[in-house]
Image (spheres, rainbow, N blue to C red):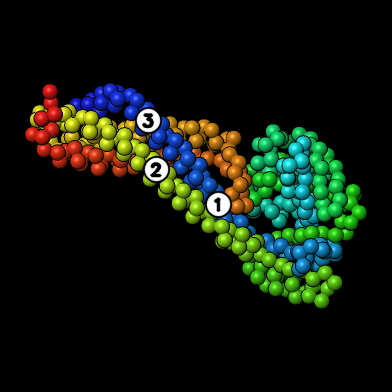
Amino acid sequence: MSGHWKLIRRNLGRARGRLVLTVSGVGAGVLVLCVLLTVVHGLRRFTAQATAQPVIGVADRYGALGMPESHASLVRAMPGVVSAMRVNLGNGTYRDPKERIRLWAADAFAVESVLGGFPGFGSLARTDYERLSRNRRGALVGKALALRYGWQGGDTMALRGHFDDEDHEFELTVAAVIPPGFFDNAIVFHRELLQEKTLTHKGQVDLILLGATASEVSRLVSEIEEGFVNSAAPVRAIAASTLFSRLLAGTSLVGIATALSLLVFVAVTAIAANSVALSVRERTREVAVLRALGFSRRDVFGILVGESTLAALAGGVLGTFLAVAGFSTAGFVVKVGPLRYFEVPWTSIPLGLAFAVGVGVMAAVGPALRAVRFPIVQASRALP
């Protein structure tokens, strides 16, 4: 067996140009695969966490008018409601007017109790929420924004916010950066700052988010809508599980990313198979010599497959290293459904290496079988 490994190592070193091509091709494929699998994993995790939250959203039934603040007090008093957070929604800009930022002017004291279980918010520490509550200019900043503008905790930022037909300037301090989740491109800040500046938004709220007892969510959704049906501002209530299920149902994002992963596997396997096939064809005489020296078909087959697998594994090591080193901390930003920011987890390493080994084996099986089945006499005629 040790003799076989010596042959494998020597043969890999002989055709260095082809070896580089195989290693780089597999490495690029593994890099792309790690990114795609990260997207798939992120979407699945987001869906599981978001749809499990006992949170209810309440908004104006007609979608454009907003609601009086008194609605929040009324729904907060309903049995089964644990907490309520008033929100005014707007868009903002920082330096570049073309880069839109989603602004949430919310009750800072209720952010943890209402959103604390959602992707991203659940990873914040209690001290992060305390810094937000204590500093009336404090803000929670999405990861994608922090990456884009270089924001860190304690930094001050001057934003221009647009709420309906009003523009306002806000000077905010980063209380914490929200880990990857639904708010990657959003900023949450104290609603009272908007109330101090606005004219048309005084006493008005765009959205009320309710933290509820899990077993009471369905009942509350019906009761809230029925309770305001004759109001001057009727509302529509929807559970977070229903909202996010609808949001993700029509996009098939996981299926698309999975399909792309399979295409990457096929493409990389084809590249590696072509390289192995060229190598085997060029070494027809060597295969004949090995067979004539007493090497069995199984031995020769193992040598050829071993060469391909070892080269592909080297590419796998390269690809996973680049993926993890490049994107495990800094991450990458891409708009995929409700998410924008992803980080490649360290768990991608075994998956990437397994992918590379699979590529190496599958690429070599066909050419290696043809080589060992080729008659020794015919192969020997190619000898000088």
- The span from disc 1 to disc 3 (Cα, nearest Å) is 33 Å
Q: Earlier in the sequence, mark 2 or mark 3?
A: 3
In the rendered view, does 309 fall on the left or right side of 374?
right
- The span from disc 2 to disc 3 (Cα, nearest Å) is 14 Å
- The span from disc 2 to disc 1 (Cα, nearest Å) is 24 Å
Q: Judge whether residue 280 can be spotted in this image.
A: yes
Residue identified by numbered label 3: 21
In the rendered view, does 245 fall on the left or right side of 225?
left
Q: Residues within 10 Å of mark 1 (few under 14, many from 20)?
A: many
Q: Residues within 10 Å of mark 2 (few under 14, many from 20)?
A: some
Which numbered disc, 1 or 3, marks the residue closer to the eye? 3
The kind of secondary structure element at disc 3 is helix
* Residue 61: image location, x then y, percent: 76, 68
Check the picture and name the quadrant holding the C terminus: top left
Residue identified by numbered label 2: 267
The kind of secondary structure element at disc 2 is helix
Residue identified by numbered label 1: 43
The three-letter code of the residue at mark 2 reads Ala
* Residue 206: image location, x then y, percent: 79, 59
Report the residue at 91% width, 54% height from top. Answer: 199
Above or below: residue 231 compared with residue 145: below
Which one is nearer the viewer's eye here, 246 or 343?
Answer: 246
